[in-house]
């Protein structure tokens, strides 16, 4: 494989000298100034070197993590983690990055591509974390509703038993799919549809839904959304669903 | 009798992410990094999936601090008469602003008295760029913000006649339309 002069020069530098050059050039690159990103790509290359599926250049890996952790932090949404993303999330991002490198062969031809990839891994890690949290909230909400309905056993033991078996949901896959489909048919207004699911799939209270809608510039009945307006809309949708013969049939057959 | 509790139960149990794109695909979609067909496929899913819409709305990285933004001023290409952006019947003038690989298309439907509407779409390389933040400001008045949907569409209603500045931010790029005039004489 042919290497440019710049690549040769970068390959001969010690990791310390590379780190200094990389920090300097990354800053230039960020501010759209002329930059030589060969030094940065060389750190990526060394960090990703493997032998028998084991990373071999630990100092390069540490340098990569030190230099680009700030890039990860900058791409973790403050909306997803209002209380400042912890080190946990950053570690999860790096873990996924190294896993991807282990599963395939990562190679970057430009700093833009390398940081773009790191950014994608960051956002997908955040998505996974939020999904996991919502799934957990849904399971808890289901347990609470189920426990409330079964007037008898609300003991911590019964609750934890339910939590331990989230598959023991009170509706089968067919019923759930049919309910989703029927909701889509009945709730024609896309905003009402979204609000209904925000309430029940993410467990967001009307206040939080109103805040999020207002933040994104969405208007409800041509006004800035209020918790009351959101709550009224959810009640309306609920009445509409409860009056539907197919949904009544679906739930009674349970 | 069907109780609200029963409907709540099935609603909570019903939304799952089995049919959703992978987290990697959704992340690439949010960042506008997918290729054309994949971007369209994921956009079509996101349009109908409240879970992915919410994920996209809250997981997209915030715009970079001012100092790290690449600031581009969009230039107007010749306005053309076109069918409304969303395929409406009325023929509004489409104004197309271009900065690097980002295009902002704007239509201004006929006003209702002095209440104007602005409908737009943000595109990158011809594809709708989802979830960009869009800000509109008249002079020193308080800016209004909106966020593009899964296909890059956004709208503002209830605007008064005047000169506006429109700013679109996506990731580390800020595209500015320095002067958009809403006027009966335009």
Image (cartoon, coloured by chain):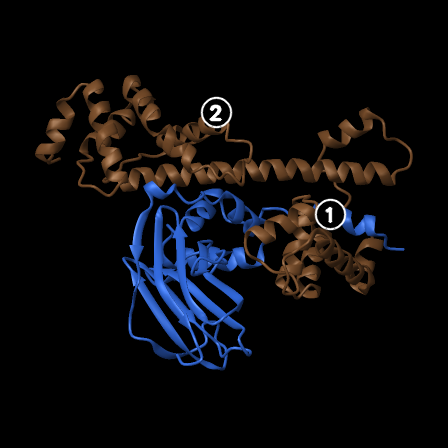
- Give me the residue at 52% from left, 56% from top: B45
Query: Is residue A100 something that shows in the picture?
Result: no
The label shown at residue A172 is 1
Assign a secondary structure to mark 2.
helix
- Give me the residue at 45% from left, 26% from top: A91
Assign a secondary structure to mark 1.
loop
Shown colour of chain B = blue
Residue B157 falls in which quadrant of the image? Answer: bottom right
Q: Position of residue A118 (x, y in %)?
A: 37, 36
Residue tagged by mark 2? A87
Q: Position of residue B39 (x, y in %)?
A: 42, 56
Q: Which lettered chain is shown in brown?
A: A
Residue A249 vs residue A118, the one in the foreground: A118
The correct choice, above or below, for B75 with respect to A216 in the image is below
Residue A141 falls in which quadrant of the image? Answer: top right
In the rendered image, the quadrant that contains the C terminus of chain B is: bottom left
Side of B107 relative to A64 (left or right): right
The label shown at residue A193 is none
Of all chains, the one bearing label 2 is A
- Give me the residue at 35% from left, 52% from top: B174
């Amino acid at each position: 494989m042919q290497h440019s002069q710049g690549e040769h020069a970068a390959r001969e530098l010690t990791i310390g000298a590379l780190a200094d050059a990389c920090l300097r050039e990354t800053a230039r690159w960020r501010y759209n100034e002329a930059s030589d990103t060969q030094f940065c790509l060389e750190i990526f290359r060394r960090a990703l070197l493997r032998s028998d599926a084991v990373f071999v250049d630990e100092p390069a890996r540490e340098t990569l993590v030190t230099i680009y952790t700030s890039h990860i932090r900058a791409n973790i949404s403050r909306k997803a983690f209002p209380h400042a993303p912890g080190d946990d999330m950053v570690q999860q991002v790096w873990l996924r990055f190294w896993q991807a490198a282990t599963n395939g062969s990562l190679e970057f031809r430009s700093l833009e591509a390398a940081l773009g990839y790191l950014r994608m891994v960051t956002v997908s890690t955040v998505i996974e974390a939020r999904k996991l949290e919502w799934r957990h909230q849904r399971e808890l909400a289901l347990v609470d509703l189920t426990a409330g309905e079964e007037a008898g056993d609300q003991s911590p033991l019964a609750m934890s038993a339910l939590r331990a078996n989230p598959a023991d949901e009170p509706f089968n896959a067919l019923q759930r799919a049919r309910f989703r489909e029927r909701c889509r048919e009945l709730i024609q207004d896309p905003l009402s549809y979204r609000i209904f699911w925000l309430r029940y799939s993410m467990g967001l209270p009307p206040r939080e839904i109103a805040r999020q809608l207002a933040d994104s510039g969405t208007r409800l009945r041509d006004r800035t959304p209020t918790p009351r307006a959101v709550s009224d809309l959810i009640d309306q949708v609920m009445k509409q669903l409860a009056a539907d013969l197919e949904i009544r049939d679906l739930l009674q057959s349970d | 009798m069907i109780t609200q509790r029963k409907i709540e139960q099935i609603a909570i149990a019903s939304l799952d992410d089995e049919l959703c794109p992978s987290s990697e695909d959704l992340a690439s979609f949010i960042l506008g990094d997918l290729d054309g067909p994949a971007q369209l496929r994921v956009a079509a899913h996101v349009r109908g999936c409240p879970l992915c819409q919410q994920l996209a709305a809250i997981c997209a990285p915030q715009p970079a601090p001012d100092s790290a933004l690449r600031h581009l001023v969009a230039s107007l290409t010749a306005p053309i008469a076109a069918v409304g952006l969303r395929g409406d019947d009325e023929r509004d003038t489409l104004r197309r602003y271009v900065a690097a690989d980002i295009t902002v298309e704007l239509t201004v439907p006929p006003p209702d008295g002095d209440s104007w509407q602005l409908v737009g779409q943000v595109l990158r390389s011809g594809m709708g760029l989802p979830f960009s933040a869009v800000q509109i400001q008249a002079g020193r008045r308080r800016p209004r913000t909106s966020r593009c949907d899964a296909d890059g569409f956004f709208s503002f209603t209830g605007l008064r006649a005047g000169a506006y500045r429109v700013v679109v931010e996506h990731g580390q790029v800020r595209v500015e339309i320095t002067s958009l005039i809403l006027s009966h004489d335009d």
